[in-house]
Image (spheres, rainbow, N blue to C red):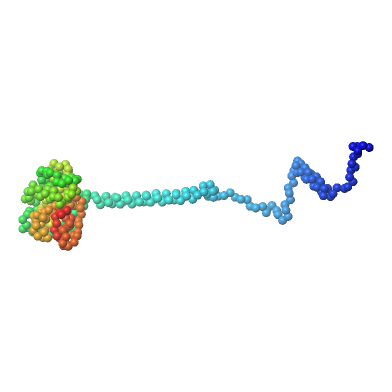
Amino acid sequence: MPPSTLRAAPSAVPRSPRGAEHAGSSRGGEEARTLRDAPGPRIARPLPPGRDLGDRPPARHPHGRVRRFVTRWGWRAYAIPILAVATVITLADLFLGGTTTARTDAGTAASDTPATAAPGPTGGPESTAPPAPAQGDADPTETASAPPESAGFVQQGAGTVTVVDGTSPVYGTGPLQRFVVEVEDGIGIDGAEFAAAVESTLGDPRSWGNGGRMSFQRVGPGEAAAGAFDFKVTLISPGNMEAYCPGVGTGGYTSCRYGDRAVINLARWETAVPDYQGDVATYRLYVVNHEVGHALGNGHQQCTGPGRPAPVMQQQTLGLDGCTKNAWPHP
């Protein structure tokens, strides 16, 4: 027989058990898949021993609103409430502070309201006190000694005043201060002479206009009626000082500044004070500069030391306190 027709006889050697197991497992897997994919109702797996349905873990509840808010907004969740509280505090502080300020301002306004002055004689001082407080050389609680009746001047004039007529040139340089000169009627003083003395004092380089600080010009009745002036210099008899300086406490002895008036006491103008030892001319310079200094906004000063010139804003009428007399702001 030709070799090509020869076929190998099947081996009679039996298959190994491992191979049989592999084949069996393959067939078992296919059978399992077939059963799993087959249509029909599914059978629940049995629970492991020792467990029942009550052993399930508790269901998780959703987060609260605050936690969800924090999760969503991050650091802003803390910043927003803090800023809100700060805003409320600030607004409350502003409201309360504004109320306090308003009350304070109201109290200040009430204290600054001019008081009604004692009514003076016809043609005398205005019926209302000035916006600024009055100033004088005696406290309101003190009363200076009135001059003796034998003094060579009128104790009490008519109580009315007359504006001295005429104007002056401008003295000095700097911001202009216009002033009116008034003299009480019935006191026997020549108004033009008194006005000339005031002009000469304020026009001196040692006075308030020193170094171009300000300039001065006297104006007449027309400007006085129109209110076109900055202050007045008024000569008044001692008996009428309290009518022109109500509440200051001049006692008929000292001079004062009341409102826009620098009020010169006739008694001091004629006789000066003891510490000036009869030097009436120098005292006249002092009293004009001192009272006009008040009208310009200057307050009182103290003696700077024994033997030194007294500041012009020192109350030299009441004593020199160890200083020497001085009539000028810039000696």
Classify 225 as above or below 151: above
| Residue at 12% across, 57% down | 253
Question: Residue drawn at (15%, 46%), measured in percent from left and top?
Answer: 172
Q: Residue 204: where, in percent of width, then height?
A: 13, 50
* Viewer-proximal residue among 207 and 39: 207
**Res. 33 image quadrant:** top right
Q: Residue at x 17, y 53 (%)?
A: 330
Q: Position of residue 70 (x, y in %)?
A: 52, 49
Q: Residue furthest right?
A: 1
326 left or right, relative to 46: left
- Which residue is outermost to the front? 3
Camera sees residue 35: no
Q: Is residue 82 visible?
A: yes
Quadrant containing the N terminus in the rendered view = top right
- Residue at 50 percent across and 49 percent down: it is 75
In the rendering, at what x and y percent does residue 276 appear? Answer: 11, 59
